[in-house]
Image: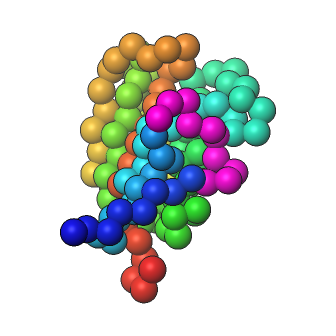
Amino acid sequence: MTKRTPIFAKDGAKPAGQYSHAIVANGFVFVSGQGPHHPKTGQLPPDFAGEVRQAIRNLEIILKAAGTDLAHVVRVNAYLADLGNFKTYNDVYREFFAVEPPSRTTIGCLLSGIQVEIDCIAALPEGK
């Protein structure tokens, strides 16, 4: 049986439902979708680009708690409330994944009061 370890990042936003921030299994970290709420204040950034940055920073917090980082991300799924924001999303995404970006899917869907949600899968560094 595969060992499965739930991760709850103490500095991460409190999960809004019945889920772990991430699950570690078979050398990978599977991070649940992260929205753009600031984990300490609960505030939303004032614009779409800020929401994307905060959602990725929220991923970073959880990845760090699991023992990895954005450099080890192999897969990203992003959900945008308005695909008209794709160019802005892509420009901000490039700030975090400038070289050798992970594989990615971006879809449009309606989200509750937020403009973006992002999840990812990352490899654990060797020896972790």
- Whether residue 11 is visible to the viewer of this picture, yes or no, is yes
Relative vertical location of residue 9 with respect to residue 40 in this rendering, above or below: below
Residue 102 found in image quarter: bottom left
Q: Quadrant of the N terminus?
A: bottom left
Q: State yes or no: residue 11 in magenta.
A: yes
In the picture as drawn, the residue positioned furthest to the right comes out as 41
Residue at 41% in and 71% down: 124
- The percent position of residue 92, horizontal first and vertical second, equals 52, 39
Span of residues in magenta: 9-18
The correct choice, above or below, for 89 with respect to 80 in the image is: below
Q: Nearer the viewer, residue 103 or 128?
A: 128
Question: Is 19 left, or right, of 43 in this rendering?
Answer: left
What residue is drawn where x is 48% and y is 27%? 116
Name the foreground residue: 2 vs 26.
2
Q: Residue furthest left?
A: 1
Residue 11 lies, in percent from the top left, at: 69, 51
In this rendering, position of residue 71 left or right of residue 50: left
* Picture coordinates of residue 108, whole percent (x, y): 33, 20
